[in-house]
Image (cartoon, helix red, strand yellow):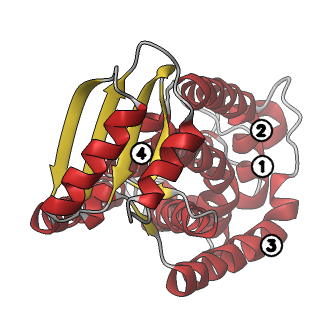
């Protein structure tokens, strides 16, 4: 039985394709501006590196009664310490103190003054991160991020035609750069969990872009009539509801984690929330739009040995 290629109107049945690509030039220009702005912000402002990367000390305390955090901050500041952080950890009776590495005599001074304020405190954890350890964490985290991107590049390059692959890869780079730019802009503390959240953002954005690219490739192979512009709009219309629902549910879960996860997961949750939002947009207006601008056509998608079959 010979198969017949279907036109766009015959193929989409109940779908009425929305003209997503009408906004592609504007969205693409905004993305380029956002990437340039993010790089500029990172160069000018740098990052608010946490103790995991700068080295320092973390003291975790549990008290029978909720302490006065302002009083604790005044005591620590009067002891001669700067750049410290005192905040609740999960509950009002659990406290975490973070500060740069100090000398032994200053440490003893801190212990004596703080314990006067919280003389009924139970020390749950004292953690020291030296400069060598923090450098190792930074190098290992950066290497993990680069390896994740490299593996994605190889996978996408083998799976898709180079125009679709290029759009997907640049969308991932776009998401990571803008996410880092926002972290720099809002001075969000960079901890080791940020590396995990960035890799999660890469995975989420990749999954979204692959779903879009798979549908575009499928429609190119299934539809004989229509130009690439119409096929892109049809494909995006078909997966739009799935993309929005998935992103909305993911962002709701991350938002709950941000609200109730405590300070230890604060940076992780914010990074993931930003990345999911940007990744959803980039899968449509970076990955897809770029492939269209690179001039993708039917002959680029269809196998070279595939013969057009005529109707009976």
Q: CA distance from mark 3 to mark 2?
A: 18 Å
Q: CA distance from mark 3 to mark 1?
A: 14 Å
- Residue, disc 1: 233
- Residue, disc 4: 197
Does residue 302 lie above or below 296 as drawn? above
| Front residue of 279 and 308 | 279
Which one is in front in this view, the residue at disc 3 or the one at disc 2? 3
Q: Are marks 2 and 4 in contact (CB under 8 Å)?
A: no
| Front residue of 74 and 183 | 74
| Front residue of 8 and 310 | 8
Look at the numbered disc 2 and give the secondary structure of its residue: helix
Query: Going by the image, does 54 lie left or right of 104?
Result: right
Q: Are marks 1 and 2 in contact (CB under 8 Å)?
A: yes
Query: Going by the image, does 97 lie left or right of 167?
Result: left
Q: Earlier in the sequence, mark 4 or mark 3?
A: 3
Q: Are marks 4 and 1 in contact (CB under 8 Å)?
A: no
| Residue 224 marker | none
Provide residue 185's location: percent of width, then percent of height: 63, 69
Residue at 65%, 39% (x, y): give it: 5
Provide residue 211's location: percent of width, then percent of height: 53, 39
Q: CA distance from mark 4 to mark 3?
A: 30 Å
- Residue, disc 3: 25
Look at the numbered disc 3 and give the secondary structure of its residue: helix
Q: Are marks 3 and 1 in contact (CB under 8 Å)?
A: no
| Residue 237 marker | 2
Provide residue 220's location: percent of width, then percent of height: 60, 48
Query: Going by the image, does 240 lie left or right of 20?
Result: left
């Amino acid at each position: 039985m010979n198969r017949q290629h279907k036109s766009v109107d015959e193929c989409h049945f109940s779908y009425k394709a929305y003209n997503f690509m009408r906004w592609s030039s504007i969205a693409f220009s905004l993305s380029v501006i956002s990437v340039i702005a993010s790089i500029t912000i990172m160069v000018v402002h740098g990052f608010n590196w946490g103790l995991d990367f700068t080295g320092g000390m973390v003291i975790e305390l549990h008290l029978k009664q909720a302490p006065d955090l302002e009083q604790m901050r005044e005591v620590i500041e009067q002891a001669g310490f700067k750049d410290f952080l005192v905040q609740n950890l999960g509950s009002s009776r659990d406290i975490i103190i973070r500060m740069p590495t100090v000398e032994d005599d200053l440490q003893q001074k801190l212990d004596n003054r703080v314990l006067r304020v919280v003389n009924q405190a139970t020390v749950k954890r004292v953690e020291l991160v030296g400069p060598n350890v923090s450098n190792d964490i930074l190098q290992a985290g950066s290497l993990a991020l680069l390896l994740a991107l490299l593996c994605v590049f190889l996978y996408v390059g083998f799976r898709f035609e180079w125009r679709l692959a290029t759009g997907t890869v640049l969308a991932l780079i776009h998401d990571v750069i803008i996410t880092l730019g926002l972290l720099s802009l809002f001075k969000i503390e960079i901890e080791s969990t940020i590396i995990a959240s960035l890799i999660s953002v890469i995975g989420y954005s990749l999954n979204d872009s692959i779903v879009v690219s798979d549908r575009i490739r499928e429609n190119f192979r299934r539809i004989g009539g229509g130009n690439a512009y119409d096929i892109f709009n049809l494909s995006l219309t078909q997966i739009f509801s799935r993309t929005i629902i998935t992103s909305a549910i993911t962002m709701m879960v991350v938002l709950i984690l941000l609200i109730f996860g405590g300070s230890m997961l604060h940076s992780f949750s914010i990074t993931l929330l930003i990345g999911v939002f940007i990744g959803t947009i980039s899968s449509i207006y970076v990955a897809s739009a770029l492939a269209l601008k690179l001039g993708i056509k039917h002959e680029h998608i269809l196998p070279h040995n595939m013969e057009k079959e005529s109707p009976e």
